Amino acid sequence: MSNRIKESFLKLTIRFSAGFLVFFSIFKIVLKIFKTGSFNQMVADYFGSGNWHFFVAQILIGSLMYGLFMAGYYKFIKK
């Protein structure tokens, strides 16, 4: 845990954001496959014409917010 305190805020943010980006993307895709029951329907819903912008923006904003929160927590609150 002391390693995270010594790292820069930007490096922590990128590290937490990248991990959450991968996890949240896989989670949303798998959940959509189970919800619709079809891989093709998931592709049409998330990656169809005009829909992929919303999916990518949602994932990027969510992961950035998580990364900023966790980096702030480890850098400034949990000392």
Image: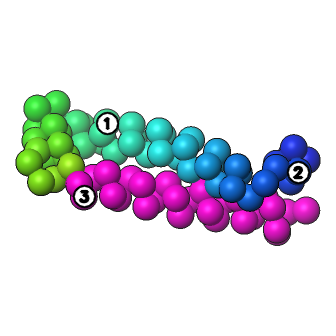
Sequence order check, earlier mark of 3 and 1: 1
Q: Position of residue 71 (x, y in %)?
A: 70, 59
- On screen, residue 21 versus residue 7, left or right, reads left
Which disc is residue 5 wearing?
none
Q: Alpha carbon of mark 3 to alpha carbon of mark 2: how far? A: 36 Å
Q: Which residues are magenta?
A: 53-79
Sequence order check, earlier mark of 2 and 1: 2
The residue sitting at 35% across, 58% down in the picture is 58
Q: Alpha carbon of mark 3 to alpha carbon of mark 1: how far? A: 17 Å
Q: Position of residue 66 (x, y in %)?
A: 56, 59
Residue 35 seen in render: no
Above or below: residue 79 compared with residue 49:
below
Which disc is residue 54 wearing?
3
Per the image, the residue denoted by label 1 is 30
- On screen, residue 67 versus residue 50, left or right, reads right
Nearer to me, 8 or 44: 8
Residue type, mark 2 in image: Lys
Q: Alpha carbon of mark 2 to alpha carbon of mark 1: how far? A: 36 Å
Q: Quadrant of residue 77?
A: bottom right
> Mark 2, residues whose alpha carbon is within 10 Å: few (<14), some, or many (≥20)?
few
Helix, strand or loop at label 2? It is helix
The residue sitting at 27% across, 52% down in the picture is 55
Residue type, mark 3 in image: Phe
